[in-house]
Amino acid sequence: SKASHHRCPMEEDLPNILPLPSHNFLQMNRLLNSVISHFNVPNYSPSALSTTSAPTEWWKNVSSLANVTYIPTAYKPSESANYNHRIFYHWRESTFDPSGGEWQLHIEYIVGGLLLIGFLFFFINPIIYYCCVGNKICCQDTKRKEPGGAGTNLFFWLTWALAAIGAAVAFYGFVNFYKEGNSVANDIGDLSTYLSEINKIPTSIITDTTDFVDVTSVAINNVQTCITNSGSSSVAINSTDSLSSISDLIDQFSSLTMSTEIEDAATLAGVIAFDAKETKEVRFSGIILFGILAGISLLGLATLTILVLNTDYNFNDPTWLMSLVRFLTLFAGSVLLIASWVTFSMIVGTSMTSGDFCQDPLGNTLSLSSGNTMVEYYLTCAGDNTAFSAISNGQAKLVEAMDTIVSELELASKNDIGCNTVVSEETDNVSNSGYEIILALESAASVVECKTINEIYANAVYQNFCDDFNSAETFVFRGLFILTLSLLACVFVWKVLISQADTEAERLCSKRDIFA
């Protein structure tokens, strides 16, 4: 029968039926489930939609969709964001400028200056070492002391401890930097997916509406055929009114066109998320490499210094194992010093950037959106939500169409011409098809609410980036600064200790020669 042909399909029918209204609801629910952790919307089960009959005369009890007023969370810069904003505050333009200008130029100058300072220092350091340690003129009193004398023992372990603390602080910052970078990438990725799926809603709803048109047309034809076969010439369905209602419904949903502004925002967010995720393994490897270099440098220096202070080990004639330890220590220390200062300089630049941006993240994001009205709406939740208005008006048109169509179909029943069964079956088919659209509209209304996207934005930008990411940057550059300066001093003092050990060995040899 026609009724069985237009029954609500079971879930096992899905692979073999296209187009199918409930197939679009599967797509809708994938969207809702992918971001359900960020917001609360009705979660309609696809199987329930396809197997549950619509409530009796549901269109008479539909409540108009209400656009929920949402006031976005106000943001106050965190302590770490303010700290990063104040870096070299008096030497640069510190107001974020999306176009670059002097603001970006000043940051580049500062980063370049720090790199230059590091280069000059590493270039001058061997000269300082040679003057104070490598020749027999400077620092004679200190070098004549026994190993660890003249405060070198205390100063070595003090600088070593500071270097270890700096390495630990930097490592902690790197780990948080990695975690927060992943969190921001995931949130922006969710936002990109979410915006893209919003743009698919019009196609999904129009497809469901087209199916509703097919069901309604068949229903009208079947009931009209029954009326004709009954021989009743006084009863006829006014299909013009019904088809006019359907036409209004299609026109209303056709206004739900895809937005190029939303698609542009989704594409940009997707590129940012992809780039961040692509560097995930590199960032993780960098953390591991930093830990290995710091461990080798600090443990190697400690081991070599203990040998100098507590044994009569001859560093002028080392074993192969000790030569290897010494080589690895100096190599790892040199790489660590250079990499730490370069990274420190770059992190200072990113810290100033993020600190300046997070003084007014909403205003700065709006300035970056280049007048994208849809982005502006979802960031401020102010103004008209055109997508919601189209969905709400579509709901009203659907209710109006259902009332007109069902009234026409029930005309045959009212005249008792033997078509009651056909009318009942076809009315149920139309009701079930229309009810699926109502549920889709309710889900879509929840999806396009400003609250939904704004909460994802606030979590990604305010919490993960402006608060946590800024905090991680602060730990990193503070730790690297302490590590670099302390490790340089530590290596320098260690060289002095070696000179003291060499002097002590020469003195002992002289005594043995005298008493020989």
Image: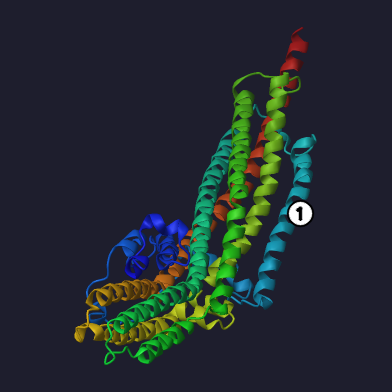
Which residue corresponds to the image point at 20% horizontal and 85% vertical from the top-left? 414
Q: Is residue 312 visible?
A: yes
Which residue corresponds to the image point at 44% horizontal and 71% vertical from the top-left? 453
Is residue 316 shown above or below 301? above
Q: Horizontal placement of 500 versus 371: left or right?
A: right
Q: Which residue is mark 1?
A: 120
**Residue 152: image location, x then y, percent:** 61, 35
Nearest to the observer: residue 325 or residue 277: 277
Q: Horizontal placement of 335 versus 54: left or right?
A: right
**Mark 1 falls on what kind of element?**
helix
Which residue corresponds to the image point at 73% horizontal and 20% vertical from the top-left? 320
Residue 217 falls in image quadrant = bottom left
Question: The N terminus appears in which quarter of the rendering?
Answer: bottom left
Is residue 11 shown above or below 454? above
Nearest to the observer: residue 90 or residue 499: 90
Amino acid carrying mark 1 in the image = Leu
Residue 259 falls in image quadrant = bottom right
